[in-house]
Image (tube, rainbow, N blue to C red):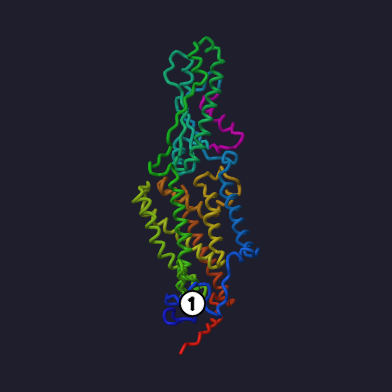
């Protein structure tokens, strides 16, 4: 049946297939004629408990789940913090003090690594080159560095030759997000200050410093200076490291909303859904088509339209707003594939679940994805449930890839390699799941085309002679 050449019979009071409104009813709009059924009133319908039941239960459950899922991931990051990856670098080359087998730098780093009884920090003993590499690949959130002259500077403090106050350097990694970098900075700073206090107690208790003047003793009580520096800098237009998350969110929303809009538009054009704009209502003639062919049509259109949406996202964020971004061709290709994977997933879920598909896909791609993405709150600072979700939730995989491109020179070991793999896996799963379900429905004869009963004609008043 050709959608443009045939018009099914339509009940009076609806808009015709060609878009023209067929009006019925009296001048007051309350009835369609002497034989038209009386229209219900809101006051009467509101007294029906069954009318309230489904919307009340669904909206209540949705509000409860959204609250628990969103707030559950961020409400207590300090309490859930476990094994945050932080580098611990000992560059101290000084000779061990008299009577000791190791220099102070070696003693200090060993004590720091062993003192974290709560397990908040996952200390990694690294060389300076290894620490810089892991900062540049997003594998650690920060680092604490003991310099080469640490032992010599401490020894000199107890003599008249003291010229340099010993330092410990805290390196931050803003590309890992403002909260994650802040947590690492707080942990490393606290460790350095505790080290300074411990060394200070030893120095002030030494007989060598017993007769030191008050100013010197004050210096010796807190001898180590803590210096904070950026270990891996990012651009000023990077949202303090959050631009990767929000850009990923744009890609997911573009795929999610685009997939739903394309699905609705196709259903409307094929006559399987109505269009209602203000008081105007239309329904096109229904085109007989299988579920599998409908899904194929929607997925092909998704692949085409995503080219436009991703291009506009990059135009708005990079060209107009000036977001810091490098590897632009790669960023566009990755953005297209990421958003397309979401769009294909939305089409597959909608085809499988029908009317509730939009709600299911919203939970899959957004509701469960946001708190388990690790882009705003590190996965080491969320409950175990969200760490489990992060293994397969799309937003975590996509955000790692975007962050690698924007902040870590598009390195595969910064998360980009895994992101490409998960995009491929997700796309294949969407295709297999979607077409498996539609072919099953088609073989069972579960067509979307539902015959409508013929409209009851209105009686016409006799014409006056």
Percent x, y of residue 305: 40, 64
Percent x, y of residue 274: 49, 71
Q: Which of 381 and 7 is in front in this view?
A: 7
Q: Relative to residue 96, is residue 121 depicted above or below? A: below
Element under label 1?
A: loop
Percent x, y of residue 315: 35, 54
Left of 259 or right of it: where is 61?
A: right
Q: Which residue lies furthest to the left in this view?
A: 319
Left of 239 or right of it: where is 370?
A: right
Q: Relative to residue 377, is residue 423 depicted above or below? A: below
103 inside magenta stretch:
yes
Q: Which residue lies furthest to the right in this view?
A: 49
Residue 164 seen in render: yes
How many marks are shown on the rendered structure?
1
Q: Residues within 10 Å of mark 1 (few under 14, many from 20)?
A: some
Find disc 1 in the rendering and name its residue: 24
Q: Relative to residue 458, is residue 189 depicted above or below? A: above
394 inside magenta stretch:
no
Q: Which residue lies furthest to the front in this view?
A: 465
Query: What's drawn in magenta, residue-wise?
Result: 101-123
Residue 296 seen in render: no
- Identify the residue at horizontal 61%, vertical 55% (top origin): 60
Q: Which of 447 and 192 is in front in this view?
A: 447
Q: Nearer the viewer, residue 290 or 464?
A: 464
Q: Nearer the viewer, residue 183 or 70?
A: 70
Percent x, y of residue 227: 45, 29
- Identify the residue at horizontal 46%, vertical 47% (top origin): 414
């Amino acid at each position: 049946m050709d959608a443009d050449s045939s018009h099914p019979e339509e009940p009076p009071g609806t808009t015709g297939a060609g878009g023209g409104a067929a009006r019925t009813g009296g001048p007051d709009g309350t009835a369609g004629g002497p034989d038209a059924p009386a229209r219900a009133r809101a006051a009467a319908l509101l007294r029906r408990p069954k009318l309230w039941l489904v919307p009340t239960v669904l909206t209540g459950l949705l509000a409860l789940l959204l609250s628990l899922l969103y707030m559950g991931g961020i409400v207590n990051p300090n309490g859930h913090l476990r094994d945050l990856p932080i580098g611990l670098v000992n560059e101290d080359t000084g000779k061990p003090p008299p009577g000791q087998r190791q220099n102070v730098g070696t003693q200090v780093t060993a004590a720091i690594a062993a003192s974290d009884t709560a397990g908040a920090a996952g200390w990694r003993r690294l060389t300076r080159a290894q620490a810089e590499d892991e900062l540049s690949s997003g594998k650690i959130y920060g680092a604490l560095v003991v310099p080469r002259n640490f032992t010599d500077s401490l020894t000199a403090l107890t003599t008249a030759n003291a010229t340099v106050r010993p330092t410990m350097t805290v390196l931050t990694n803003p590309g890992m997000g403002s909260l994650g970098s802040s947590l690492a900075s707080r942990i490393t700073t606290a460790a350095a200050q505790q080290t300074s206090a411990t060394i200070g107690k030893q120095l002030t208790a030494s007989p060598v410093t017993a007769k030191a003047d008050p100013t010197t003793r004050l210096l010796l009580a807190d001898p180590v200076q803590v210096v904070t520096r950026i270990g891996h800098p990012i651009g000023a237009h990077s949202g303090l490291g959050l631009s990767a998350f929000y850009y990923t969110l744009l890609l997911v929303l573009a795929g999610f909303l685009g997939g739903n809009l394309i699905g609705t538009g196709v259903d409307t054009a094929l006559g399987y859904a109505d269009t209602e704009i203000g008081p105007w209502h239309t329904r096109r003639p229904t085109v007989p088509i299988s579920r599998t062919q409908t899904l194929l049509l929607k997925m092909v259109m998704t692949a085409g339209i995503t080219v436009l949406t991703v291009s506009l996202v990059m135009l708005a964020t990079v060209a107009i707003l000036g977001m810091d971004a490098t590897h632009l061709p790669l960023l566009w290709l990755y953005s297209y594939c990421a958003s397309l994977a979401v769009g294909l997933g939305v089409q597959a879920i909608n085809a499988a679940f029908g009317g509730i598909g939009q709600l299911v896909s919203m939970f899959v791609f957004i509701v469960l994805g946001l708190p388990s993405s690790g882009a705003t709150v590190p996965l080491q600072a969320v409950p175990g449930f969200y760490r489990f979700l992060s293994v397969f939730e799309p937003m975590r995989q996509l955000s790692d890839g975007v962050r690698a491109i924007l902040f870590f020179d598009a390195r595969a070991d910064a998360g980009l390699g895994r992101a490409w793999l998960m995009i491929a896996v997700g796309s294949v799963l969407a295709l297999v799941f979607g077409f498996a379900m539609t072919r099953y429905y088609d073989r069972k004869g579960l067509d979307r085309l539902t015959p409508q009963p013929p409209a009851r004609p209105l009686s016409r008043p006799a014409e006056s002679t």
